[in-house]
Every structure is written in structure tokens, then in C-alpha cells.
Image (cartoon, rainbow, N blue to C red):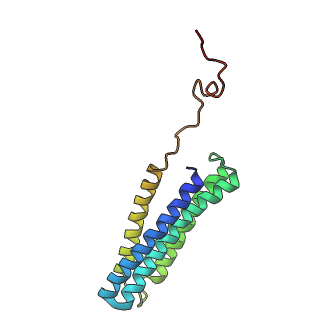
């Protein structure tokens, strides 16, 4: 599995996770605090998915810009810039909505925490199942396997 397929799988599983958290959180929020709890849980799930996707998209964009050269400084600038953007936007959004009357901070917080923990689990599971090689080397005999010229005959 290549890195692009891996990141696409992370995004797909993240969308499924955000949907599950949105449904469970919306029901729990609706039962505990009415529409205020419902909208807070939905907003928390949406925030978590958007921020998960920003990381994956920044890595995909960095790969495209640098031509898969992970040691290129532009790769690090793009990925770290995405993380910094995500952090700043998250803080600004939290500051803007923390004192709003229409938000239940507990439902919002729990939805974000559930989504973040779930996305970490998704990252671990997807990477562990990816079967990606650690190194790209040719072992002795790899070139010989294609041709039969080096066979020892009695």
C-alpha cells in the first residue's frame, strides 16, 4: 500500500468515525440538553473531522509539491504549516464559540475528545495493517531470480 492510499483510508475511516460520533453525540446531546446539546455534539464531530482531514491533505499536498522527497524542506514547511494552521484555527474557533448561549461546552468537548481518540486509534490500525516496507533495498539474489543464468548445474 502506498502513502496516498494510506492517507485516503485514514480520511475515509475518519469520516465514518465522525459520523458515528455525530450520531451518538447528537442523540446524547438531544436527550441531555435538547437542541443545544445536539448542535454542540454535531459541531464537535465536524471540527474533529475537518482537523483530521487537514493533516492528511497537507501530507498529500506536500508529497505532490516535493515529488515524494520527504527530506525536502518544502515537505516539512507544508506539513508543519498545516498543523500550525489547524492549531490556530482551532483556538480561534474555541475562543469565538466558548461563551455562546447556543453551545453546550460539555457535549462539544466530549464529541471532540471521542473523535480525537478515535482518530488516533484509526491512525494506528491503518498504519499497522498497511504492510509497508521499512526500507527499499535489493537483497542478494534479487536480480538473479529473474534470470536462470546463475544456476549451478551438476
Q: Quadrant of residue 22?
A: bottom left
Horizontal side, residue 72 vs residue 39: left or right: right
* Residue 94 position (above or below residue 66): below
The residue closer to the viewer here, 23 or 89, is 23
Horizontal side, residue 148 vs residue 133: left or right: right
Horizontal side, residue 37 vs residue 129: left or right: left
The residue closer to the viewer here, 47 or 136, is 136
Residue under the point 36% across and 85% down:
37
Horizontal side, residue 24 vs residue 63: left or right: left
Q: Quadrant of residue 45?
A: bottom left
Residue under the point 60% across and 28% down:
142
What is the x, y in percent for residue 94? 46, 77
Residue under the point 47% across and 66% down:
14
Q: Identify the image quadrant of the C terminus.
A: top right
What is the x, y in percent for residue 118? 39, 64
What is the x, y in percent for residue 6? 54, 55
Residue under the point 57% across and 52% down:
3
* Residue 75 position (above or below residue 143): below
Amino acid at each position: 500500500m502506498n502513502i496516498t492510499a494510506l492517507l485516503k483510508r485514514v480520511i475515509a475511516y475518519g469520516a465514518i468515525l465522525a459520523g458515528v460520533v455525530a450520531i451518538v453525540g447528537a442523540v446524547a446531546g438531544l436527550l441531555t440538553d435538547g437542541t443545544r446539546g445536539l448542535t454542540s455534539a454535531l459541531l464537535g464531530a465536524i471540527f474533529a473531522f475537518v482537523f483530521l482531514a487537514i493533516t492528511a491533505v497537507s501530507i498529500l499536498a506536500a508529497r505532490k509539491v516535493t515529488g515524494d522527497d520527504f527530506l525536502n524542506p518544502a515537505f516539512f514547511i507544508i506539513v508543519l504549516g498545516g498543523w500550525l494552521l489547524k492549531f490556530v484555527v482551532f483556538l480561534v474557533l474555541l475562543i469565538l464559540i466558548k461563551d455562546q448561549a447556543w453551545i453546550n461546552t460539555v457535549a462539544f468537548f466530549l464529541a471532540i475528545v471521542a473523535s480525537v481518540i478515535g482518530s488516533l486509534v484509526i491512525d494506528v490500525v491503518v498504519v499497522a495493517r498497511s504492510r509497508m516496507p521499512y526500507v527499499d533495498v535489493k537483497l542478494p539474489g534479487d536480480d538473479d531470480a529473474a534470470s536462470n543464468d546463475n544456476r549451478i548445474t551438476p
